Amino acid sequence: MLETALGIDHGAARIGIALSDPLGITARPLETIHVAKEPPLPRISKLAHDHAATKIIIGLPLHMDDTEGPQAKEARAFAAALKPLLPPDVPIFLVDERLSTKEAEKHLTRAGKKGGRKQNKDLIDQTAAAVILQDYLDNGC
């Protein structure tokens, strides 16, 4: 069965988006939404529609002791606000995203991407979304 998923790395300033292949095997960076320039919810709804997404995976930023802080509450509120903009049969899953940004930076370094965090913010956010989504796919969820 074909099941394309969108992965989301939610942030206050930027939101990284990733997309899985239709078989749900691999995730790739797709784009970064700049919250100050574009309302993110309609854009994500459009991406879900355009790519026929069958599920949405949103990173849930947990503390290292498994507790939730303000950012986790923001991610939950974001998921709740997005849900009505999706078809009713498209579920949203919140998954642990601890250390996804660090993992994204490692991926980019291994890929030979030059420049630091400041120069690559958009790419880091997209790649972090891909890390979150790939972790979800790899764990057979």
Image (cartoon, rainbow, N blue to C red):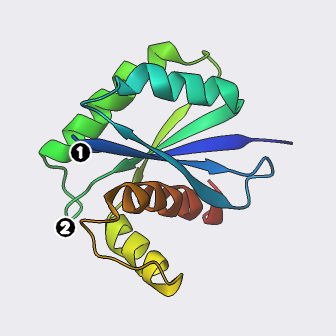
Per the image, label 1 sits on a secondary structure element best described as helix
First in sequence: mark 2 vs mark 1: 2
Residue furthest to the left: 70
Could you say where residue 39 lies in the image, as x and y percent from the top left? 34, 22
Q: Is residue 8 above or below residue 84?
A: below
Image-quadrant location for residue 111: bottom right
Could you say where residue 85 lies in the image, as x and y percent from the top left? 49, 15
Q: Judge from the rendering whether residue 98 lies leftward or rightward of residue 123; answer left or right.
A: left
- How many neighbours does mark 2 have within 10 angstroms: few (below 14), some (14-19), or many (20 or more)? few
Q: Is residue 67 above or below residue 46?
A: below
Q: Which residue is mark 1?
A: 72
Between 141 and 18, the residue placed more toward the observer is 18
In whole angstroms, how far apart are the C-alphas of marks 2 and 1? 13 Å
Could you say where residue 25 lies in the image, as x and y percent from the top left? 74, 60
Q: Judge from the rendering whether residue 102 lies leftward or rightward of residue 74; answer left or right.
A: right
Residue at x 53% of width, y 23% of height:
45
Q: The N terminus lies in which quarter of the figure?
A: top right
Could you say where residue 22 lies in the image, as x and y percent from the top left? 79, 46
Q: Judge from the rendering whether residue 116 lies leftward or rightward of residue 31; answer left or right.
A: left
Which amino acid lies under the numbered mark 1 shown in the image of this protein?
A: Ala
Which amino acid lies under the numbered mark 2 shown in the image of this protein?
A: Asp
Image-quadrant location for residue 11: top left
Residue at x 19% of width, y 67% of height:
65
Residue at x 19% of width, y 56% of height:
67
Residue at x 30% of width, y 65% of height:
119
- How many neighbours does mark 1 have within 10 angstroms: few (below 14), some (14-19), or many (20 or more)? some
Q: Judge from the rendering whether residue 99 lies leftward or rightward of residue 113; answer left or right.
A: left
Q: Which residue is mark 2?
A: 65
